[in-house]
Image (spheres, helix red, strand yellow):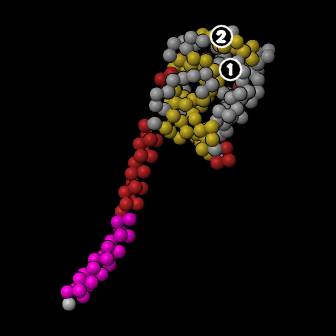
């Protein structure tokens, strides 16, 4: 009698355990999913952003509708970085360009050859779409020394880009630089680093 009662008790406990197990697993998965979503939201709110490219000024490096991941925390501007700029009173949306020079450097352009010269040296630019032709739309005077706290930016598609060569933009205050574009995530056929063609 005692044996039967003990056996029945064990059977009952095992059955209850089996009934509870799927619920516990579902709860664990739900908690993990919620935690992952919170982490993703925090990361994209404070550390990175996804930006959609608009326009042709960065061709052939980037094309309109490309989506890139932008790092925003602790960024220090450097030559060659592709950055997103949000200048007040310029456009109603950010624009994306490449840093050609930082504060204290002197930029000159030889329009006869299309070469860009920084601190007296012609820079190697395998990423450009075409060499520079004469830029006539409110062009600034060259050579120019980049003021403190600013950067000189240009689009890779030099002849279809409004950038620091124009008096409308000029050298960009670093406070308006949102961050550095690191990776392309769309289209998936071009997934990866956007600096492969830096040379």
Q: Secondary structure at mark 1?
A: loop
Q: Nearer the viewer, residue 52 or 32?
A: 32
Quadrant where the N terminus sits is bottom left
Q: Quadrant of residue 42?
A: top left
Residue 25 drawn in magenta: yes
Q: Which residue is mark 1?
A: 137
Q: Position of residue 80 (x, y in %)?
A: 63, 25
Q: Nearer the viewer, residue 86 or 145?
A: 145
Neighbor class of circle 1 (other Cα within 10 Å; few <14, some 14-19, many 20+) is few
Q: Is residue 12 visible?
A: no
In three-dimensional space, the C-alpha distance between marks 1 and 2, rounded to whole angstroms, equals 25 Å
Q: Residue at x 32, y 78 (%)?
A: 15
Position above or below: 34 against 24: above
Quadrant where the C terminus sits is top right
Q: Residue at x 67, y 44 (%)?
A: 190
Q: Is residue 41 visible?
A: yes
Q: Residue at x 39, y 65 (%)?
A: 26
Q: Position of residue 87 (x, y in %)?
A: 52, 26
Which stretch is magenta?
2-26
Residue sitting farthest toward the left: 2
Q: Nearer the viewer, residue 104 or 195?
A: 195
Position above or below: 195 against 192: above
Q: Quadrant of residue 25?
A: bottom left
Q: Position of residue 194 (x, y in %)?
A: 64, 36
Residue 119 is marked as: 2
- Of labels 1 and 2, earlier in sequence is 2
The majority secondary structure of the magenta stretch comes to: helix
Residue 40 drawn in magenta: no
Q: Given contact means CB atoms under 8 Å apart, are the residues at marks 1 and 2 in contact?
A: no
Left or right relative to 117: residue 153: left
Neighbor class of circle 2 (other Cα within 10 Å; few <14, some 14-19, many 20+) is some
Q: Secondary structure at mark 2?
A: loop
């Amino acid at each position: 009698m005692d044996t039967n009662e003990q056996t029945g008790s064990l059977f009952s406990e095992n059955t209850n355990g089996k009934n509870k197990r799927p619920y516990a697993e579902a709860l664990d998965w739900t908690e993990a999913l919620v935690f992952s979503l919170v982490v993703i939201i925090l990361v994209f709110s404070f550390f990175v952003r996804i930006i959609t490219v608009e326009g042709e000024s960065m061709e052939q490096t980037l094309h309109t509708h490309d989506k890139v991941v932008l790092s925003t925390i602790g960024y220090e501007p450097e030559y060659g970085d592709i950055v997103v700029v949000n200048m007040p009173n310029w456009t109603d949306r950010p624009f994306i360009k490449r840093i050609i020079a930082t504060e204290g450097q002197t930029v000159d352009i030889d329009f006869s050859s299309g070469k860009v010269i920084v601190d007296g040296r012609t820079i190697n630019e395998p990423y450009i779409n075409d060499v520079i032709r004469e830029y006539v739309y409110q062009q600034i005077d060259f050579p120019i020394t980049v003021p403190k706290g600013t950067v000189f930016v240009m689009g890779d598609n030099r002849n279809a880009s409004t950038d620091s060569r124009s008096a409308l933009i000029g050298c960009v205050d670093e406070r308006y630089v949102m961050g550095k574009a690191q990776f392309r995530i769309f289209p998936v056929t071009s997934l990866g680093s956007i600096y492969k063609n830096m040379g």
